[in-house]
Image (tube, rainbow, N blue to C red):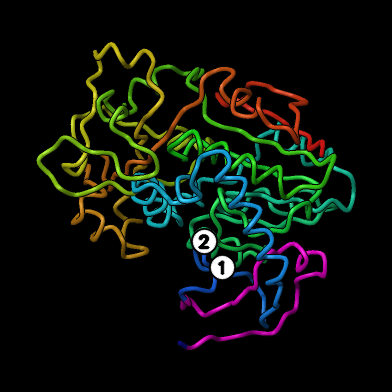
Amino acid sequence: MVFCFTRLNRISKANWEAFTLPIFVSCGISHPGIFKPMREIKVKGLSSLHNLASDGESHVQRSTSLVEEETGSLSVVQSTPEIEKKYVHRVYDAIAPHFSSTRFAKWPKVATFLNSLPSGSLVLDAGCGNGKYLGFNPDCTFVGCDISEPLIKICADRGHEVLVADAVNLPYRTGFGDAAISIAVLHHLSTENRRKKAIDELVRVVKKGGLVLITVWAVEQEDQLLVTKWTPLSQKYVEEWIGPGSPRVRSPSSITLESIPETENNSKEHEKDTESPGHKFGGTVLLTSKDDSSVQNQQEYFVPWHLPYHRAEVSGASACALANGLAKKDDKKGAVVYNRYYHVFSEGELERLVSGMKNAVVVDRFFDKSNWCIILQKTL
Protein backbone atom coordinates (compact mmCIF):
# COMPACT_ATOMS: atom_id res chain seq x y z
CA MET A 1 0.00 0.00 0.00
CA VAL A 2 1.46 3.35 -1.07
CA PHE A 3 0.84 6.56 0.85
CA CYS A 4 1.73 10.02 -0.34
CA PHE A 5 2.56 12.31 2.56
CA THR A 6 2.72 16.04 1.98
CA ARG A 7 4.18 18.77 4.11
CA LEU A 8 2.17 20.30 6.97
CA ASN A 9 1.59 23.94 6.15
CA ARG A 10 -1.72 25.17 7.50
CA ILE A 11 -2.90 23.11 10.47
CA SER A 12 -2.44 24.95 13.73
CA LYS A 13 -1.37 23.35 17.01
CA ALA A 14 -4.92 23.79 18.31
CA ASN A 15 -6.33 21.97 15.30
CA TRP A 16 -3.84 19.11 15.65
CA GLU A 17 -4.82 18.70 19.26
CA ALA A 18 -8.44 18.30 18.19
CA PHE A 19 -7.91 14.86 16.71
CA THR A 20 -8.34 11.81 18.86
CA LEU A 21 -6.90 9.25 16.42
CA PRO A 22 -3.63 8.93 14.51
CA ILE A 23 -4.06 10.45 11.06
CA PHE A 24 -2.80 9.13 7.73
CA VAL A 25 -3.28 11.35 4.72
CA SER A 26 -3.24 9.42 1.48
CA CYS A 27 -3.62 10.25 -2.18
CA GLY A 28 -7.03 8.63 -2.26
CA ILE A 29 -5.84 5.18 -1.13
CA SER A 30 -7.46 3.72 1.94
CA HIS A 31 -5.54 1.70 4.51
CA PRO A 32 -7.87 -0.80 6.19
CA GLY A 33 -7.49 -1.08 9.94
CA ILE A 34 -5.98 2.32 10.71
CA PHE A 35 -9.28 3.92 11.65
CA LYS A 36 -11.17 1.02 13.08
CA PRO A 37 -14.47 2.72 14.02
CA MET A 38 -14.79 4.93 10.96
CA ARG A 39 -14.11 5.53 7.31
CA GLU A 40 -10.70 6.61 6.04
CA ILE A 41 -9.81 10.11 7.23
CA LYS A 42 -8.32 12.67 4.89
CA VAL A 43 -7.36 16.18 6.00
CA LYS A 44 -6.49 19.11 3.80
CA GLY A 45 -2.80 19.95 3.90
CA LEU A 46 -1.65 17.33 6.38
CA SER A 47 1.74 15.75 5.99
CA SER A 48 3.17 13.40 8.56
CA LEU A 49 1.75 10.76 10.82
CA HIS A 50 0.89 12.21 14.22
CA ASN A 51 0.62 9.55 16.88
CA LEU A 52 -2.20 10.48 19.21
CA ALA A 53 -3.06 6.87 19.86
CA SER A 54 -2.98 6.89 23.63
CA ASP A 55 -5.70 9.51 23.91
CA GLY A 56 -7.51 7.97 20.97
CA GLU A 57 -7.66 4.59 22.65
CA SER A 58 -9.14 6.04 25.82
CA HIS A 59 -11.72 7.93 23.78
CA VAL A 60 -12.79 4.78 21.95
CA GLN A 61 -13.11 2.96 25.24
CA ARG A 62 -15.25 5.74 26.70
CA SER A 63 -17.47 5.74 23.61
CA THR A 64 -17.89 1.98 23.77
CA SER A 65 -18.83 2.11 27.44
CA LEU A 66 -21.37 4.87 26.86
CA VAL A 67 -23.05 3.18 23.91
CA GLU A 68 -23.13 -0.25 25.49
CA GLU A 69 -24.70 1.20 28.61
CA GLU A 70 -27.44 2.88 26.58
CA THR A 71 -28.08 0.37 23.79
CA GLY A 72 -26.38 -2.85 24.80
CA SER A 73 -24.09 -2.85 21.78
CA LEU A 74 -21.67 -0.42 20.18
CA SER A 75 -22.49 -1.78 16.73
CA VAL A 76 -26.19 -1.04 17.19
CA VAL A 77 -25.49 2.66 16.84
CA GLN A 78 -22.22 2.89 14.94
CA SER A 79 -22.99 0.40 12.16
CA THR A 80 -24.33 2.44 9.27
CA PRO A 81 -27.77 1.22 8.19
CA GLU A 82 -28.06 0.11 4.59
CA ILE A 83 -30.72 2.72 3.86
CA GLU A 84 -28.28 5.49 4.81
CA LYS A 85 -25.46 4.03 2.71
CA LYS A 86 -27.60 3.84 -0.42
CA TYR A 87 -30.00 6.75 -0.06
CA VAL A 88 -27.75 9.27 1.68
CA HIS A 89 -24.05 8.54 1.26
CA ARG A 90 -24.10 7.27 -2.32
CA VAL A 91 -26.54 9.90 -3.48
CA TYR A 92 -24.60 12.85 -2.08
CA ASP A 93 -21.40 11.41 -3.48
CA ALA A 94 -23.05 11.26 -6.92
CA ILE A 95 -24.65 14.72 -6.86
CA ALA A 96 -21.90 16.57 -4.95
CA PRO A 97 -20.85 19.10 -7.65
CA HIS A 98 -24.44 20.00 -8.57
CA PHE A 99 -25.55 20.00 -4.94
CA SER A 100 -22.67 22.31 -4.04
CA SER A 101 -23.60 24.75 -6.83
CA THR A 102 -27.01 25.27 -5.17
CA ARG A 103 -25.61 25.74 -1.64
CA PHE A 104 -24.38 29.27 -1.12
CA ALA A 105 -26.95 31.34 0.81
CA LYS A 106 -26.48 31.42 4.59
CA TRP A 107 -29.47 30.96 6.85
CA PRO A 108 -29.88 34.14 8.96
CA LYS A 109 -30.31 32.24 12.25
CA VAL A 110 -27.14 30.21 11.66
CA ALA A 111 -25.29 33.37 10.69
CA THR A 112 -26.48 35.10 13.87
CA PHE A 113 -25.31 32.17 15.99
CA LEU A 114 -21.85 32.09 14.40
CA ASN A 115 -21.43 35.86 14.64
CA SER A 116 -22.35 35.75 18.33
CA LEU A 117 -19.39 33.53 19.23
CA PRO A 118 -16.42 35.11 21.03
CA SER A 119 -13.38 36.03 19.00
CA GLY A 120 -10.90 33.16 18.84
CA SER A 121 -13.54 30.41 19.20
CA LEU A 122 -12.80 27.03 17.64
CA VAL A 123 -15.94 25.86 15.82
CA LEU A 124 -16.78 22.42 14.42
CA ASP A 125 -19.23 22.07 11.53
CA ALA A 126 -20.29 18.40 11.63
CA GLY A 127 -21.89 17.58 8.28
CA CYS A 128 -20.38 20.64 6.63
CA GLY A 129 -21.46 19.74 3.08
CA ASN A 130 -19.70 22.09 0.65
CA GLY A 131 -18.41 24.20 3.55
CA LYS A 132 -20.58 27.26 3.11
CA TYR A 133 -20.39 28.06 6.85
CA LEU A 134 -16.68 27.30 7.26
CA GLY A 135 -14.86 30.56 7.86
CA PHE A 136 -18.12 32.50 8.03
CA ASN A 137 -16.99 34.39 11.13
CA PRO A 138 -13.44 35.58 10.35
CA ASP A 139 -12.70 35.98 14.07
CA CYS A 140 -13.20 32.24 14.68
CA THR A 141 -11.32 29.12 13.60
CA PHE A 142 -13.39 26.48 11.79
CA VAL A 143 -12.91 22.76 11.19
CA GLY A 144 -15.41 20.66 9.29
CA CYS A 145 -16.29 17.06 8.54
CA ASP A 146 -18.77 15.22 6.36
CA ILE A 147 -19.48 11.63 5.37
CA SER A 148 -19.24 12.51 1.65
CA GLU A 149 -15.71 12.44 0.30
CA PRO A 150 -16.61 14.42 -2.88
CA LEU A 151 -18.11 17.21 -0.77
CA ILE A 152 -15.05 17.20 1.50
CA LYS A 153 -12.84 17.52 -1.59
CA ILE A 154 -14.83 20.61 -2.62
CA CYS A 155 -14.22 22.08 0.86
CA ALA A 156 -10.53 21.20 0.75
CA ASP A 157 -10.12 22.78 -2.68
CA ARG A 158 -11.49 25.99 -1.15
CA GLY A 159 -8.79 25.90 1.52
CA HIS A 160 -10.86 24.70 4.48
CA GLU A 161 -9.60 22.34 7.20
CA VAL A 162 -11.83 19.31 6.72
CA LEU A 163 -11.94 15.53 6.88
CA VAL A 164 -14.23 12.62 6.10
CA ALA A 165 -16.02 11.42 9.24
CA ASP A 166 -19.26 9.92 10.53
CA ALA A 167 -21.60 12.10 12.59
CA VAL A 168 -22.13 9.32 15.14
CA ASN A 169 -18.39 8.77 15.65
CA LEU A 170 -16.57 12.10 15.45
CA PRO A 171 -12.74 11.77 15.41
CA TYR A 172 -12.11 14.70 17.75
CA ARG A 173 -10.87 14.91 21.32
CA THR A 174 -13.43 15.43 24.07
CA GLY A 175 -13.86 19.11 24.90
CA PHE A 176 -11.65 20.46 22.11
CA GLY A 177 -14.03 23.08 20.66
CA ASP A 178 -15.88 26.16 21.82
CA ALA A 179 -18.95 25.53 19.65
CA ALA A 180 -20.38 23.07 17.13
CA ILE A 181 -23.08 23.21 14.49
CA SER A 182 -25.08 20.47 12.78
CA ILE A 183 -27.11 21.99 9.96
CA ALA A 184 -29.63 19.75 8.17
CA VAL A 185 -27.83 16.52 9.09
CA LEU A 186 -29.73 14.58 11.78
CA HIS A 187 -32.76 14.04 9.55
CA HIS A 188 -30.61 11.74 7.38
CA LEU A 189 -29.99 9.35 10.30
CA SER A 190 -32.48 6.51 10.20
CA THR A 191 -32.87 5.44 13.85
CA GLU A 192 -33.55 7.31 17.05
CA ASN A 193 -30.45 5.82 18.70
CA ARG A 194 -28.24 7.12 15.90
CA ARG A 195 -29.80 10.56 16.14
CA LYS A 196 -29.20 10.57 19.91
CA LYS A 197 -25.63 9.40 19.44
CA ALA A 198 -24.93 12.18 16.93
CA ILE A 199 -26.16 14.74 19.46
CA ASP A 200 -24.05 13.11 22.19
CA GLU A 201 -21.00 13.44 19.94
CA LEU A 202 -21.65 17.13 19.26
CA VAL A 203 -21.87 17.83 22.97
CA ARG A 204 -18.86 15.65 23.76
CA VAL A 205 -16.47 17.55 21.50
CA VAL A 206 -17.19 21.03 22.95
CA LYS A 207 -15.86 22.43 26.20
CA LYS A 208 -17.94 23.02 29.32
CA GLY A 209 -20.06 26.07 28.56
CA GLY A 210 -19.75 25.43 24.82
CA LEU A 211 -22.75 25.83 22.54
CA VAL A 212 -24.21 23.43 19.97
CA LEU A 213 -26.66 24.52 17.26
CA ILE A 214 -28.74 21.79 15.59
CA THR A 215 -31.26 22.25 12.76
CA VAL A 216 -33.47 19.60 11.12
CA TRP A 217 -36.25 19.54 8.56
CA ALA A 218 -39.71 19.80 10.11
CA VAL A 219 -42.89 17.84 9.48
CA GLU A 220 -44.65 21.18 9.79
CA GLN A 221 -43.49 22.56 6.45
CA GLU A 222 -44.55 26.11 5.66
CA ASP A 223 -45.38 24.96 2.13
CA GLN A 224 -47.43 21.80 2.59
CA LEU A 225 -47.60 21.29 -1.18
CA LEU A 226 -43.97 20.20 -1.00
CA VAL A 227 -44.82 17.42 1.43
CA THR A 228 -47.54 16.07 -0.85
CA LYS A 229 -44.92 15.66 -3.58
CA TRP A 230 -42.45 13.74 -1.42
CA THR A 231 -42.53 9.95 -1.47
CA PRO A 232 -43.62 8.55 1.90
CA LEU A 233 -42.29 5.20 3.04
CA SER A 234 -45.09 2.75 3.76
CA GLN A 235 -45.97 1.92 7.35
CA LYS A 236 -45.16 -1.75 6.77
CA TYR A 237 -41.74 -0.74 5.55
CA VAL A 238 -41.12 1.43 8.60
CA GLU A 239 -42.33 -1.26 11.03
CA GLU A 240 -39.95 -3.81 9.50
CA TRP A 241 -37.03 -1.43 9.77
CA ILE A 242 -35.06 -3.24 12.43
CA GLY A 243 -32.16 -1.51 14.22
CA PRO A 244 -29.19 -0.49 12.11
CA GLY A 245 -29.64 -3.24 9.54
CA SER A 246 -31.46 -3.27 6.24
CA PRO A 247 -35.25 -3.11 6.37
CA ARG A 248 -36.92 -6.33 5.29
CA VAL A 249 -38.49 -5.19 2.06
CA ARG A 250 -41.59 -6.99 0.81
CA SER A 251 -40.89 -6.84 -2.91
CA PRO A 252 -39.89 -9.22 -5.68
CA SER A 253 -36.38 -7.83 -5.63
CA SER A 254 -33.71 -9.28 -3.39
CA ILE A 255 -31.63 -6.11 -3.57
CA THR A 256 -31.10 -4.59 -0.15
CA LEU A 257 -31.25 -0.92 0.72
CA GLU A 258 -28.26 1.10 1.74
CA SER A 259 -28.28 4.91 2.34
CA ILE A 260 -28.99 8.62 1.51
CA PRO A 261 -27.33 12.11 1.51
CA GLU A 262 -27.72 15.51 3.09
CA THR A 263 -29.44 18.77 1.89
CA GLU A 264 -30.59 22.24 2.78
CA ASN A 265 -32.98 24.80 1.35
CA ASN A 266 -31.32 27.57 -0.62
CA SER A 267 -32.20 27.40 -4.32
CA LYS A 268 -35.75 27.49 -5.64
CA GLU A 269 -35.30 24.29 -7.63
CA HIS A 270 -33.69 22.21 -4.89
CA GLU A 271 -34.72 23.99 -1.69
CA LYS A 272 -36.98 21.06 -0.95
CA ASP A 273 -36.72 19.15 -4.24
CA THR A 274 -39.80 17.07 -4.86
CA GLU A 275 -41.53 14.56 -7.09
CA SER A 276 -44.80 12.69 -7.09
CA PRO A 277 -45.05 9.62 -4.84
CA GLY A 278 -44.86 6.18 -6.42
CA HIS A 279 -44.98 2.57 -5.37
CA LYS A 280 -41.42 1.45 -6.04
CA PHE A 281 -38.01 2.94 -6.62
CA GLY A 282 -35.46 0.68 -8.24
CA GLY A 283 -37.77 -2.24 -7.51
CA THR A 284 -36.78 -2.32 -3.84
CA VAL A 285 -39.13 -0.21 -1.76
CA LEU A 286 -42.86 -0.31 -1.15
CA LEU A 287 -44.31 3.17 -0.86
CA THR A 288 -47.63 4.54 0.29
CA SER A 289 -50.04 6.24 -2.06
CA LYS A 290 -51.14 9.85 -1.74
CA ASP A 291 -54.48 8.94 -0.20
CA ASP A 292 -53.02 6.59 2.40
CA SER A 293 -54.31 7.68 5.81
CA SER A 294 -50.95 6.91 7.37
CA VAL A 295 -49.46 9.90 5.54
CA GLN A 296 -51.06 12.12 8.19
CA ASN A 297 -48.50 10.92 10.74
CA GLN A 298 -45.72 10.30 8.25
CA GLN A 299 -42.13 11.19 9.13
CA GLU A 300 -40.12 8.91 6.83
CA TYR A 301 -39.76 10.13 3.24
CA PHE A 302 -37.76 9.86 0.07
CA VAL A 303 -37.07 13.37 -1.22
CA PRO A 304 -35.82 13.49 -4.83
CA TRP A 305 -32.86 15.33 -6.25
CA HIS A 306 -33.02 16.11 -9.97
CA LEU A 307 -29.56 16.02 -11.51
CA PRO A 308 -29.76 17.65 -14.99
CA TYR A 309 -28.61 15.45 -17.85
CA HIS A 310 -25.84 17.92 -18.72
CA ARG A 311 -24.45 17.52 -15.18
CA ALA A 312 -25.13 13.83 -14.78
CA GLU A 313 -21.85 12.47 -16.08
CA VAL A 314 -19.54 14.94 -14.38
CA SER A 315 -18.53 12.25 -11.91
CA GLY A 316 -19.33 9.32 -14.18
CA ALA A 317 -21.56 7.86 -11.47
CA SER A 318 -24.98 8.31 -13.02
CA ALA A 319 -24.80 5.47 -15.54
CA CYS A 320 -23.88 3.08 -12.75
CA ALA A 321 -26.63 4.48 -10.50
CA LEU A 322 -29.21 3.98 -13.24
CA ALA A 323 -28.02 0.44 -13.85
CA ASN A 324 -28.16 -0.41 -10.15
CA GLY A 325 -31.58 1.14 -9.57
CA LEU A 326 -30.23 3.91 -7.35
CA ALA A 327 -31.51 6.53 -9.80
CA LYS A 328 -34.02 6.81 -12.62
CA LYS A 329 -34.41 9.02 -15.66
CA ASP A 330 -37.03 11.75 -16.00
CA ASP A 331 -37.02 12.74 -19.67
CA LYS A 332 -39.69 15.41 -19.13
CA LYS A 333 -37.40 17.28 -16.74
CA GLY A 334 -34.23 16.21 -18.50
CA ALA A 335 -32.74 14.86 -15.31
CA VAL A 336 -31.50 11.82 -13.49
CA VAL A 337 -33.56 11.52 -10.29
CA TYR A 338 -31.98 10.35 -7.04
CA ASN A 339 -34.06 9.68 -3.94
CA ARG A 340 -32.73 10.81 -0.56
CA TYR A 341 -33.95 9.43 2.76
CA TYR A 342 -35.32 11.88 5.36
CA HIS A 343 -36.77 11.49 8.82
CA VAL A 344 -38.57 14.80 9.22
CA PHE A 345 -38.95 15.99 12.82
CA SER A 346 -42.17 16.84 14.62
CA GLU A 347 -42.50 19.71 17.09
CA GLY A 348 -40.75 18.88 20.36
CA GLU A 349 -38.94 15.82 18.97
CA LEU A 350 -35.47 17.38 19.17
CA GLU A 351 -36.09 18.38 22.79
CA ARG A 352 -37.21 14.83 23.62
CA LEU A 353 -34.00 13.43 22.14
CA VAL A 354 -31.90 15.54 24.52
CA SER A 355 -34.21 15.38 27.55
CA GLY A 356 -32.19 12.64 29.21
CA MET A 357 -28.78 14.24 28.71
CA LYS A 358 -26.95 14.92 31.98
CA ASN A 359 -24.23 17.13 30.50
CA ALA A 360 -26.22 19.65 28.44
CA VAL A 361 -29.33 21.84 28.59
CA VAL A 362 -31.48 23.48 25.94
CA VAL A 363 -30.92 27.24 26.03
CA ASP A 364 -33.00 28.11 22.96
CA ARG A 365 -35.42 26.52 20.52
CA PHE A 366 -37.07 27.99 17.44
CA PHE A 367 -38.72 27.27 14.10
CA ASP A 368 -36.96 28.74 11.10
CA LYS A 369 -37.42 28.22 7.34
CA SER A 370 -39.40 25.00 7.91
CA ASN A 371 -36.72 23.67 10.27
CA TRP A 372 -36.83 22.87 13.97
CA CYS A 373 -33.75 24.23 15.71
CA ILE A 374 -32.25 24.01 19.20
CA ILE A 375 -29.18 25.44 20.90
CA LEU A 376 -27.60 23.33 23.63
CA GLN A 377 -25.06 24.38 26.24
CA LYS A 378 -22.67 21.86 27.75
CA THR A 379 -22.85 21.89 31.56
CA LEU A 380 -20.32 19.23 32.61
Taking the spot 56% from the left edge, 17% from the top edge, the residue there is 347
Taking the spot 60% from the left edge, 63% from the top edge, the residue there is 163
Element type where label 1 sits in the image: loop
- Front in this rendered view, residue 135 or 19: 19
Residue 38, numbered label = 2
- Front in this rendered view, residue 251 or 142: 251
- Amino acid at the residue labelled 1: Ile
The residue segment tinted magenta is 2-31
Relative to 5, residue 306 above or below: above
Q: Main secondary structure of the magenta part?
A: loop
Q: Is residue 370 magenta?
A: no
Residue 41, numbered label = 1
Tell me where residue 284 appears, x and y as whole percent.
19, 41
Q: Are marks 2 and 1 in contact (CB under 8 Å)?
A: yes
- Front in this rendered view, residue 163 or 58: 58
Taking the spot 51% from the left edge, 50% from the top edge, the residue there is 74
> Which quadrant of the view contains residue 50?
bottom right
Taking the spot 49% from the left edge, 20% from the top edge, the residue there is 221
> Would residue 16 be found to the left or right of residue 244 on screen?
right
Relative to 19, residue 288 above or below: above
* Mark 2 Cα shell of 10 Å, populated few (<14), some (14-19), many (≥20): some
- Amino acid at the residue labelled 2: Met
Q: Is residue 5 magenta?
A: yes
C-alpha distance separating marks 2 and 1: 8 Å
